[in-house]
Image: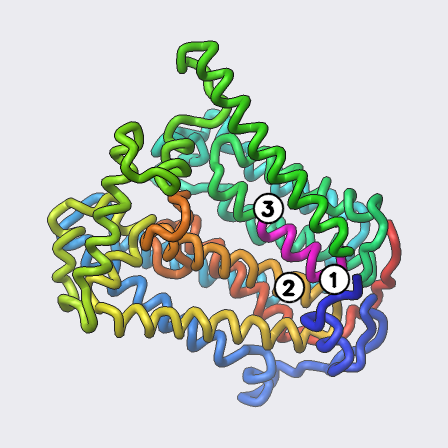
Amino acid sequence: MAPLQFTSRATRSLGGSQGGMGRGPKISLGGIGGLFQAVNIPLLITIVFLTALGLVTLYAVTLTDSDYSITKQALSIGLGLAAGVAVWLVDYRKLGSSNAAIAALLALAVTMILLPMTPLGFESNGARSWIRIGSLTLQPSEIAKPVIIVMMALFVSRFGGSINSGKDFLKCVGLLLVPAVMLAKEDLGTGLVILIIGFVIIFVGGANMRWILVTLMVGAVGVAGLLVANSAVSSWTGGETQIIKEYQMSRLLVFVDPDNPDYADDAYNLKQAQIAIGSGEITGKGWGNATQSNGGFLPESATDFIFCVYAEQFGFVGAALLLLLYLALLSSALWIGLSAGNLAGSLIVAGVMGMWLFQIIENIGMDLGLMPITGIPLPFMSYGGSFMIANFICVGLLMNVWMHRGAMPSQTAGKV
């Protein structure tokens, strides 16, 4: 399969090759003109509006729920901005795609994933995926996402936009499965996001559709087998041992059978989410008047169900505005991807876009009852320091690709 237009059109427009040889346009950082060349203004404006809406919505939650802090969220945004700027200023093309570079990125991602298993780690909401350093708490797997995006993009770009052999496809999938499988048991939602990121990059990077379809079928059979095995193990041990944690199964199965009393808690959460969204009607109840969250009826109101709080306050009109902002976010990212001029840059953008699009669809979809409940947060809206930092790092990656748009300076594509 030839690489998608996402990459091929970008390289043709800037005179670069799929493999990355040649020179791209020289970007000058001097003066106002240089600033506009280095910063994608539509993306910047969209991020400002989304972040502002997130803070406004969260502040309303903190008025009646002391579990969340607008100060901590603002601090996280500041740290995210600093991290994003640092990522923006380091030319991603200089990382190359050597075995050493890929191994270093993989080691960094694995280290982040394993940190919660050390004495620094602690359990929250049934998952041991957090670490505590003094008064600071972090979820390292969130920060691992942009690392995995860069790792997969650089590795897949080595095939020059054509992954036709099963051997090459398995190399890409094998690299992806290392962090995804490590995460899936403790943090199913984040593990799923990483799988989506990886397969988007592999697909856009020119994978043969035959191998994509085979993988999807194998995955479907594997999931079915896992569910059967989980049921058998749980039955044999009287429920004491389960492959899939009880709360994870409940979140998934309430989507299929919301009236089952075994899933009453998650069914209640879903019903309250739908009530909150519906009660906002056309124009909403007004800022600070989200009675579902203010009254304590809506759980995880600042994280999993932040969209419900927003929709209750600002109604259908506000929800439509938010969706338009997300469309602008993805459109700006697509523009950057088409302008990258080299396969690695386009694939980095594809990974970021795939992550954001899946998180938007899954979070809003689960609030509406259209998707299974997975606890996946909403980009730039949901409360969470690690999540916010990771999102701003991804913005830094996009700005990096935009500033250095053009062919890779010294990389030759080739099979691994």
Q: Secondary structure at mark 2?
A: loop
Neighbour class for label 3 at 10 Å: few (<14), some, many (≥20)?
Answer: many
First along the sequence among labels 3 and 1: 1
Q: Find out whether the residues at labels 2 and 3 contact each other: C-beta distance under 8 Å.
A: no
Q: CA distance from mark 3 to mark 1?
A: 26 Å
Residue 214's quadrant in the figure?
A: top right
Residue kind at label 3, given as amino acid type: Leu
Residue under the point 76% across and 60% down: 206
Residue that label 3 marks: 195
Residue under the point 39% across and 61% down: 380
3 vs 1, front mark: 3
Residue that label 2 marks: 90
Quarter placement of the N terminus: bottom right
Q: Say which of 298 and 110 sits in front.
A: 298
Percent x, y for residue 315? Answer: 22, 68
Q: Secondary structure at mark 3?
A: helix
Q: Is residue 94 left or right of residue 165?
A: left
Vertical arrangement, residue 410 with respect to residue 96, above or below: below
Residue that label 1 marks: 94
Residue kind at label 1, given as amino acid type: Lys
Q: Say which of 91 and 408 sits in front.
A: 408
Percent x, y for residue 9? Answer: 73, 77
Residue kind at label 2, given as amino acid type: Val
Q: CA distance from mark 2 to mark 3?
A: 26 Å
Residue under the point 74% across and 43% down: 103
Q: Which residues are magenta?
A: 196-207
How many numbered dots are placed on residues in this image?
3
Neighbour class for label 1 at 10 Å: few (<14), some, many (≥20)?
Answer: few
Residue 20's quadrant in the figure?
A: bottom right
Q: Secondary structure at mark 1?
A: helix
